[in-house]
Image: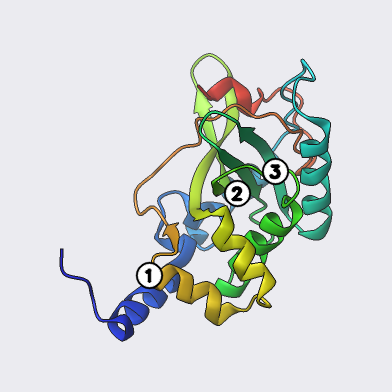
Amino acid sequence: MTKLPKPLKLSIFLLFFAAGCSALPGLRVITGEDTQDDSLAAQAIENIDLVMADKTGSTDPSIIRAADRIEAALRGFDIIEIRNNPVTHEFTVNAMNDPRVPIASMDDLRRMIELTWRGTLSESEGSDKLNITILSPIEVNTLDRGSSIIGQVLFNVEIARSDAVVYLSNGPNINDFIGMILDETMTFNQPQTLQIYRGNPNHPMFALPDTSNIPNLADFTG
């Protein structure tokens, strides 16, 4: 397959990101860009409930503490799943982004990804790959359970852990971050069709208040 010249690839990539969340189905209402149904946007934001998962306590406490540190550093960033898979040697973080704190620029995304890499350096040791997925909440109405929340994939970023370490060691910046995407050191995916989170949450999410009658996000995974 013929590769695009780097300047052209950069232009296409920046335009692709500039379309942002508004290009994704359902998100124009969630983020308030679609003013035709402001009440639905408000309801969707209010209906994010508390997600409590992995009640067995089997998740490594150090990984949970790492997730807590990252959340403390990033406003509106709620980690719902964090795992170190010793079989696949992949360290995975799935996080829900609060629509009230939009990802407005590539630098916003860079900061999220960079702090997640940095915050899990010890816990991801021994992993070959780092995989981060950022989600946005969508309200859905079910026949048997009423209103609930599912996670729509906004961005997925994969990188070899060794490359992430080099990036962090060299004084990270936006130019190097974009450069890793362009030279395919890092895989960046922004789905243009609806993709739903189907993992297994293992970290509590304290996003927004209320709605005790809304089922757990975990009920819609698997």
Q: Amino acid at mark 1?
A: Phe
Q: Along the polypeptide, which appears first: circle 2 or circle 1?
A: 1
Q: Along the polypeptide, which appears first: circle 1 or circle 3?
A: 1
Give the secondary structure at mark 3: strand
30 on left or right of 100: left
Q: Which mark is residue 16?
A: 1
Q: Amino acid at mark 3?
A: Ile
Q: Nearer the viewer, mark 2 or mark 3?
A: 3
Is 7 in front, or is 146? 7
Residue 141, given in percent of the width and then of the height, sits at 52, 28
CB contact under 8 Å: marks 2 and 1 = no
Q: Which mark is residue 117?
A: none
40 on left or right of 23: right
Give above or below for 15 relative to 149: below
Q: Is residue 105 visible?
A: no
Q: Amino acid at mark 2?
A: Ser
Q: Residues within 10 Å of mark 1 (few under 14, many from 20)?
A: few
Residue occupied by mark 3: 79
Residue occupied by mark 2: 39
**Residue at the location (82% across, 37% down)?**
62
Is the N terminus in the top left, top right, bottom left or bottom right quadrant?
Answer: bottom left
CB contact under 8 Å: marks 2 and 3 = no
Is 23 in front, or is 143? 23
